[in-house]
Image: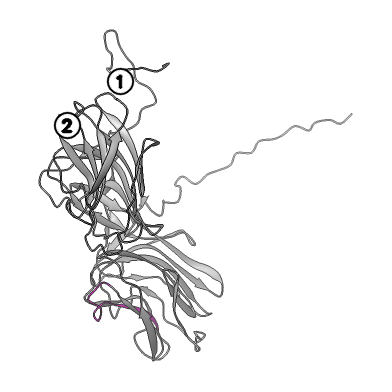
Amino acid sequence: MRRLLPITCAAVMLSATLPAAQYDRLLDAIDVPDGAYFDTGYVVKDHPRVVASISVGELNYDFDLFGVKHRSEGCWILNVDGTTTGGYQPSFYYRYGTASSGGAVGGYSARQRLDIDCGKTLFVNGEELQTFSDYDFSENTTTMTIPGTEDAHRFTLMAFQIWDGGVLVRDFLPAEKDGVCGLYDRANDQFYAPASGTVAPAYDQRVDAIHIPAGAYFDTGYAVTDHPRVVASISVGETNGQDFDLFGVKERSDGCWILNVDGSTTGGYHPSFYYRYGTYASGGAVGSFSSYQRLLIDCGKTLVVNGNEIQTAADYDFAANTAAMTIPGERRAAPYLLHSFKIEDGGRLVRDFVPAVKNGACGLYDRIAGQFYANVGTGTVTAEQYDRLLDAIYIPDGAYFDTGYVVKDNP
């Protein structure tokens, strides 16, 4: 028979102080202003590669997204130049030493996300722009900076990776530590504050929803052209005989695209959805609900609300459109709650709006382009938010909640 030996437990002394966390919170994006830059502390040597996601708007200037040395022999610089194209179609100039070449990226509206893969070959948003024949950094002794220090202008940064010899040596994400915004390197568990200047978060706080009052609206800055689709989540209550456009492209004329929510004909509880393309208008009512109801909307060529197909448009061509979409559209008479709003165009997600707060103002943050959008209309947009979730609440004698919902169908 095998005997079990007694186990002696030795006391393990733990350090009285755990290592400090390298960041307080991760951020979706940071705004890097003129003159600010980060020193990555890394000297590239062996066929380096940068993979980054940034956002630029109306440039009217140029900047170096990253830089290894100044513009001299042995430098490696990716320059984003908007000065020659009106600020909407930036050219990318890829410099190695004194060699310089590149090409423009296709047209887009005022704010655009750029996914960059820059090694021996430069790709921007999947498009190959340039390949260099000479690409030797074995003699380099200079650390890479973000952006390059010679041309450091404003842009928004979502992610930045440095590869060297096929190894991921820096994996930067925007973060905040001790009230300072900077970059957290997941590869080495280190926080980097700016070496110069001050960067700021793209927004301060996410909220569950925003209340959009009559007269308020947001300009998305995007003009749909290729079989667009909107996917949104809103809440509406008693519209009190009013109607409103959830979104709009142009006013009510040929070429418009408008989703109108009409409560005027149904007493405010059974809104009808009118789906307009140009002068064409049709739609249908969504089933009855109590005073506040969440509506999940999927509006492309076919309009679907809460899983119910409402209407399919016969004509659906936006190739000639030049007008940016607004949220809400032209008619802004009734308030509603907005939880999320996405715009697709040509099968590509171009705007992904979530409610957020920046500098005390409630608005929409676009996770695609890394930009905060404030109300450009009248009235004040407010947050619909709870303070914190609780595990349980104690309900005393006499207390109760009115759910506002009238059950109808096998509850």
Which of the 4 image quadrants contains residue 344? bottom left
Which tag, 2 or 1, sits closer to the chain's start? 2
For marks 2 and 1, give the one nearer the viewer: 2
Residue that appears at 84% across and 30% down: 3
Q: Position of residue 407 (x, y in %)?
A: 35, 17
Residue corresponding to mark 2: 264
Judge whether 235 appears above or below 24 on screen: above
Marking on residue 405: 1
Judge whether 242 appears above or below 398 on screen: below
Judge whether 276 appears above or below 75 on screen: above
| 111 or 176: nearer the viewer | 111
Which of the 4 image quadrants contains residue 269? top left
The residue furthest left is 378
**Could you classify mark 1 by the number of other residues whose Cα lies within 10 Å: few (under 14), some (14-19), or many (20 or more)?**
few
Q: Is residue 95 magenta?
A: no
Q: Is residue 78 magenta?
A: yes
Q: Which residues are magenta?
A: 76-88
